[in-house]
Image (tube, helix red, strand yellow):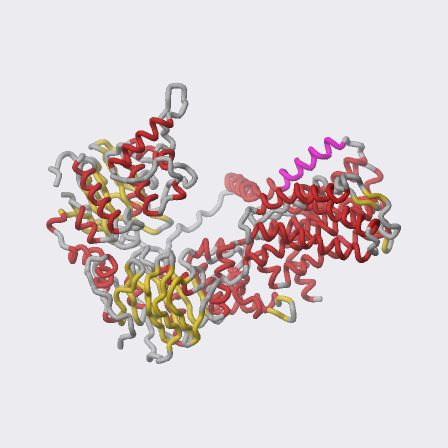
Amino acid sequence: MPAHSAPLWELNNIFKAFYGVQALKSVSLTLYPGEVHALLGENGSGKSTLVKCLAGVHQPDRGEMLHQGQAVNLHHPVEARAHGVATIFQEFSLVPSLSVAENIYLGRQLRYPGRVVNWGGMARATEQVLQRLNLHIDPQAIVRNLSVAEQQLVEIAKAISQESSLLIMDEPTAALGLDETNRLLDLIRDLARQGKTILYISHRLDEVFAVADRITVLKDGRHMITEDRAKLDIDQVVQLMVGREITQHYPKVHHAPNPAFCLEVRGLSTRKGVNNVSFEIRRGEVFGLGGMVGSGRTEIARALFGVDAHTAGEVYLEGQRVRFRSPAQAIGAGVGLIPENRKADGLFFNFEAHPNISVSRLRGMLLGPFLDLRRERRTGREFIEKLKITRNAMEKSVRYLSGGNQQKVVIARWLYSRARLLILDEPTQGIDIGAKLDVYNVINELTAQGISILLISSDYPELLAMSDRVAVLRDGCILHVTEAKHLSEYDLLAIASGASSVQAAPAGVTG
Amino acid sequence: MRIILNGLGQFFRSAVAGPLVALLLVIFFLQFTSDRFLDEGNFSNVSLQVSVVAIAAIGSTLVILVGGIDLSPGAIVALTSCSLAILVKERGYSLEEGIAIVLLMGAGLGFINGFFATYGRIPAFIVTLATFSAYRGAAFLITDGTPIFSVSPRLRPLFYDEWLGIPRPFFYTLGLFILTWLFLRYTIIGRNIYAVGGNEAAARLSGVKVNQVKLLAFVIAGVMSSIAGILTSAQLNSGSPNYGVGLELKAIAAAVIGGASLAGGAGNVIATLLGAWIVAIVQNGLNLNTVPASWQEITLGIIIVGAVGLDMWRRDIGEFVNRAMRLVVPQREPPPYSPEGGAAPPPLSEPGASP
């Protein structure tokens, strides 16, 4: 525990809004030299925004930032780096085609007089950095050929080599195994002893409690607490992250359970991180998948939809054994997927709303061998009215629609294609409250018709309120399956973050 | 009938309007420069000149629509014209048989391009750069580098005969463009061509067989190039490995002048036809004014940059005009944006706890 000397950084009453959404509301944070400071909060609590202000990516709307007592404005990441801030973001910032040494010294190559690059010096310096981290990676290795974990470690080595006073680590262990994680935690303690400050962001509370000196919790863009780790326990922290009960209305409609199974999954594994997963979904049931980012939820969706190949396990749809090798086969059998990233994977920006809706079942628009464009417009208009999509959605590219309207267009696509099982991956991410309610009502309407839903959401109150049953995942395994009403947000977070060691419950149907 | 009228309406509101206006402007200005420009004979002349480029440009447009690029049309013209000459003159096939074989050959050459660009996962630019070289090389190989003349007395009429006083190639071109337009607009595959070009990942997740669609675009492009090769042979009653040099660039130019986006998913084949006509008419106008060929090439360059630039900068120009208008004409302030219908300003409470 460092003595409380003069603070390295003081952030006072920081405000930041994006397009009318207030991401940070008067948040303050003080960082001392030589401390490991954990920043905690659920998705959307403002952690990333705060960190990006420190890294010069975003500029606060209001509030002051003091570096060793001096007020500074960081307009650009380069300025943050000049003030000793090094950041390891979740998304990698390495150049895949360059070597480890070139990446570590990217943009600040060692040179001889006369601007000639000093390759030998760079290789030796890289070796020293890697040695300090106790990493066995060849400085000349091309980054593309390294494993994800190794790339993550190179990223950390790069940040450390910059001789910075503040190291920001955003989910640094997400891609690491247990050994590598432990090594990283040792390294963090070591760096703190050398007087460096580490701002550590992680969903994994066990790690946080193993390494942090102080803990700050954010909730909905507000500062909840900053306290010494020794004075906190995991329970308190989870309670603070979850916060008081949100008074949002979830219009969940419960139906009488239908005994027939729509989907049965037995021992499903893939190379992309799904590990012996078994569950089943009844007709008209909403089955929720809870877990942290990277816990394997999206990967289960991809495996069921025929994107990722199965290495083991069996899948039954409506009692029939199915083996989808492509999304086309899955769609043909009545499965629909609303992908997590609707802009990149869901929408056709070169189309208006109606071709976006008809695309997965164009055969239904045929008149003889030709497309009936008038029927397509008519169908488009019906869905626009049914889902309350903005009226002019058929006159312009879906690029110009709001996030909520865009999402409803993608939902309409699967309503039109008559999916029997619909996989919703983060269906309400980034859309406003009104559109969220519309999405919930669509879910109710679908389940009333006997359509089954696999719901993936990082918004835990939403997941628990809208699901009939919930499975909690961690590291690609299902740890716990239960009725949603028997699971509290607290328990969900505790299991998913590894704070509570629930042993894998039998993944069968309960109740 | 109603479908056609609907289509025409769409047509003028959309992609075709810009190139059409540009074409009319070009005609308007060029008719001042030469008395012969509006002659009936000159129109026939241009429609002959434009046909080979325009037909090759159909293929280029399809490939560009799926997000690819095809550099091989010129080489396919050379190889198919030589093949037709050899088949008919030296191997004793009838003209009809020869044409049928050469069309199949075009499909096969396009298939090779498409196969490597999709299942082979090599960028289309690289694949067709390779076949750009290899197909013309094959044409030199089978002819020993010498042109074959006087292929068949029945070949020239395909190009020079007239229907209703208009040269036949005008009708071939128009027919192929209308067929392609209908194909793109009214068939599932046509729609999927736009979907794949617009967002390949989304298309795959919507059940579109992305590789098949892309492959088909390349195959059609190969067939169109072989038709261009047959017409070139008919024009000169010969086959030569030197035919079609630079054709691919003119075909791509026609597509982009017509507004096709090299990013894929956006473009209209009728606009491509207008683009080909713009290129041909400007060249014709310069010819009539005895402007040297070197200046014609430079002019083509200026047209390409100008046409695509206008499209790219359209929004900026519009914004600039708007801003200028706002300076002159005072406007009402728009209501402030509020995400949830008039939210209150954020409360200024809860200062951070400091240690």
Q: Position of residue B14 (x, y in %)?
A: 62, 53
In the image, what residue occupies the spot 19% across and 60% down?
A: A500
Q: Is residue A435 visible?
A: no
Quarter of the image with the C terminus of chain B is top left
Instruction: Return the x and y of residue B239 as percentages of the image width and height.
Output: 79, 45
Residue A49 is situated, as x and y percent measured from the top left of the image, at: 31, 46
Q: Is residue A16 left or right of residue A376?
A: left
Assess whether residue B151 is covered by the magenta stretch: no
Image: B233 above or below A461: above
Which residue is outermost to the right?
Answer: B153
Chief SS of the magenta region: helix
Magenta-tinted stretch:
B293-307
Left or right of A158? Residue A206 is: left
Splitting the image into 4 quarters, where does residue A511 fall?
Answer: bottom left
Q: Is residue B305 highlighted in magenta?
A: yes
- The percent position of residue B166, horizontal first and vertical second, equals 84, 52
